[in-house]
Image: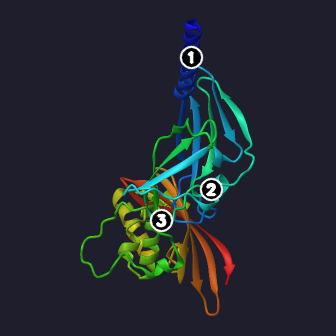
């Protein structure tokens, strides 16, 4: 009897050790898949794609279940600066409270191997207000209904900005009444473009050129670029002054100085040092509007984003 009891204890010890080894073998990491500007709501129009990686960091085979519908394998948790937790979406709650068959796959990872997939954070959480959120992921290797074992990922900082709108062009963040020397600020690419367009609408040229890389803009033209690169520093400065004056008089590069009646920021995408901002702009004619898509290319230098190039696509009339 005593031997039987010792045998049971030994079996439970080995089983517990095996479970622990499985748990310690796994690591879950998250990162933004295609980082852009994020706004409240609009799961399909403005998704927050997160790249999820499950890694085997141990020396034994790691086995886990992965549901075909990832909502039965993972959870996203997000907290604002006041440590208030974001609520789950109604779709997520409905799925988890409805009796249904959960289809899944058994996945095995050898030491050093990893498995990745991408999910839209907004399918899991209701993001209704602009704020800074701290996001983490919980992974359930035995699916959601068996939550006794779970792995928690690293945390990401998610900035949700106020929703852009056509009406944004009516708000002017710059003024012509200040006599202070203007200094560029470390603002986001979409704000750089927004302030530049608004300054153009108000004929505030100092503000308009504030976030413009004039040297790179001048060199967009091959002829000007060759001349600029071949002259002295003094002559280059003179060329920049002339280029700036020509822009103000709409004598060259008329697309970049054309004044829209209204505009709407469409999408913003950026990496650590470069990005692009797409803007729909409407230009008023006598009885109709010309609609165009401007893509402004931006680059970060010393923490300041600057416009250094652009393209224009005609979208017809309205």
Secondary structure under the numbered disc 3 in the rendered image: helix
Mark 2 and mark 3: Cα distance apart in space: 32 Å
Left or right? Give the position of 37 relative to 286: left
Let me know if residue 230 appears in the view: no
Query: Which of 61 and 250 lies nearest the eye of the viewer?
Result: 61
Let me know if residue 108 appears in the view: yes
Which residue in the rendered view is the most extreme toward the left?
180
Q: Which mark is residue 175?
A: none
Secondary structure under the numbered disc 1 in the rendered image: helix
Secondary structure under the numbered disc 2 in the rendered image: helix
Query: Which of 86 and 298 lies nearest the eye of the viewer?
Result: 86
Q: Which residue sits at x=54%, y=61%?
A: 126
Looking at the rendered image, the quarter that the C terminus falls into is bottom right
Residue bearing the label numbered 1: 14
Q: Which of marks 2 and 3 is in front?
A: 2
Q: Is residue 197 above or below residue 98?
A: below
Q: In which quarter of the image is residue 8?
A: top right
Residue 257: horizontal and vertical position, in percent?
Answer: 49, 76
Residue bearing the label numbered 2: 92
Q: Is residue 260 above or below residue 300?
A: below
Which residue in the rendered view is the most extreme toward the bottom?
286
């Amino acid at each position: 009897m005593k031997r039987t009891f010792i045998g049971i204890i030994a079996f439970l010890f080995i089983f517990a050790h095996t479970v622990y080894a499985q748990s310690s073998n796994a690591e879950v990491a998250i990162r933004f898949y295609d980082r852009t500007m994020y706004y409240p709501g609009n799961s399909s129009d403005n998704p927050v794609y997160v790249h999820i990686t499950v890694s085997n960091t141990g020396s034994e085979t790691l086995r886990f279940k992965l549901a075909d519908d990832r909502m039965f394998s993972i959870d996203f948790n997000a907290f604002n600066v006041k440590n208030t937790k974001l609520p789950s979406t109604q779709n997520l709650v409905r799925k988890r409270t409805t009796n249904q068959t959960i289809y899944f796959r058994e996945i095995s990872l050898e030491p050093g191997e990893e498995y990745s997939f991408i999910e839209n954070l907004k399918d899991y959480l209701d993001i209704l207000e602009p704020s800074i959120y701290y996001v983490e992921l919980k992974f359930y290797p035995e699916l959601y209904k068996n939550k006794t074992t779970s792995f928690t990922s690293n945390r990401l900082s998610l900035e949700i900005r106020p929703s852009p709108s056509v009406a944004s062009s009516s708000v002017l963040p710059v003024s012509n009444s200040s006599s202070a020397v203007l200094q560029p600020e470390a603002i986001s690419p979409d704000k750089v473009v927004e302030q530049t367009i608004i300054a153009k609408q108000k004929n505030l040229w100092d503000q308009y050129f504030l976030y413009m890389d004039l040297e790179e803009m001048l060199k967009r033209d091959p002829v000007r670029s060759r001349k600029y690169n071949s002259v002295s520093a003094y002559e280059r400065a003179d060329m920049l002054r002339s280029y700036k004056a020509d822009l103000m008089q709409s004598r060259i590069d008329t697309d970049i100085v054309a004044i829209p009646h209204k505009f709407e920021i469409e999408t913003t995408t950026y990496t650590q040092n470069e990005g692009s901002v797409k803007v729909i702009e409407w230009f008023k004619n006598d009885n109709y509007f010309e609609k165009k898509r401007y893509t402004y290319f931006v680059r970060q230098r010393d923490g300041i984003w600057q416009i250094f190039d652009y393209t224009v696509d005609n979208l017809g009339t309205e």
